[in-house]
Image (spheres, rainbow, N blue to C red):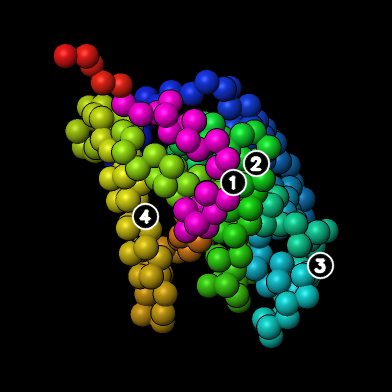
Amino acid sequence: MIPVADPGRRHTTPYVNYTLIAINFAVFLYQLYLQGQTWVGPYSELDRFIAHWGNIPPCTFDAIGWDQGFIGTGRTCSMQPAPALTPLTAMFMHIGWLHILGNMLFLWIFGDNVEEAMGHILYAVFYLVVGSVAAVTHGLVNMDTLIPAVGASGAVAGVMGSYIVLYPRSTVIAFIPPIFIPLPIPAAIVIGVWFIVELFLGFSSLGPDSAGVGSGIAYFAHIGGFVAGALLVNVFAIHKDRARALNRPRRRAS
């Protein structure tokens, strides 16, 4: 299911959500520029940029003083100017058009109503917190990987987790492939099916017999972000009653 619209109402402009989307696209356009710039040998400036600011779990944990005997990282971690900050910087980086368009579509649809319930400042803090929790969750499951993890999907998953708690009866307009006809579908079904698939693929990627299932996708970042969003939403959503009233379905007079 591919959500394309959220008919929910709001009375404030989601400035933070717009800003987050704009920053993500600005960073991505900068990455496209770097892609054609040569650095050393076969590597591009983009490779260097991702190595600098992507989330490499052993480097991040070592930077915050949590040395759990991770594998030696050598020059890889020394290339990172601020590894403790990479869970934050990595959430604004993407590796392709499909990656960023998918993440920003979900953020566009679900983020504005969550911002309505939290207010601008708390929503900004919430987004960074759940994105960081997502990065740490990914790191705990992948303590020995030197592959940088990038993308807003963990933070967006946190927004989705909070949305389903705030608006359990709302509907979204979505396509169901291969029938590309827009249909109103309960948000609980759209988000619930997505989360079940992430759980299945995430746990299928574990263990020596996983045969590379989920290779290249940080499923546990999605899972960690979603759970964090669902658990923390009531701490941040100080305007939730007002937002729920705005999104309550209208009844026709009989």
Q: Secondary structure at mark 3?
A: helix
Report which residue position mark 2 lands on.
122
Which amino acid, mark 3?
A: Ser
- Residue 188: x, y in percent? 31, 45
- Within-10-Å neighbours for mark 4: few <14, some 14–19, many 20+: many
Using the numbered discs, state the Cα–Cα distance from disc 4 to disc 2 in whole angstroms.
Answer: 25 Å
Which amino acid, mark 1?
A: Phe
Residue 78 - label: 3
- Residue 137: x, y in percent? 55, 66
Kindly identify the residue that appears in the image at 36 percent across and 54 percent down: 195
Residue 236 - label: 1
Using the numbered discs, state the Cα–Cα distance from disc 2 to disc 1 in whole angstroms.
Answer: 6 Å
Report which residue position mark 4 lands on.
195
Dividing the picture into quadrants, the one containing residue 32 is top right
Residues shaded magenta? 227-249
Mark nearer the viewer, 3 or 1: 1
Kindly identify the residue that appears in the image at 42 percent across and 47 percent down: 165
Quarter of the image where the C terminus is located: top left
Residue 231 located within the stretch drawn in magenta:
yes
Q: Secondary structure at mark 2?
A: helix
Which amino acid, mark 4?
A: Phe
Asked if residue 245 shows in the view, the reply is: yes
Dividing the picture into quadrants, the one containing residue 77 is bottom right
Does residue 115 appear to the left or right of 80 in the view shown?
Answer: left
Using the numbered discs, state the Cα–Cα distance from disc 3 to disc 4 in whole angstroms.
Answer: 36 Å
Using the numbered discs, state the Cα–Cα distance from disc 4 to disc 1 in whole angstroms.
Answer: 22 Å
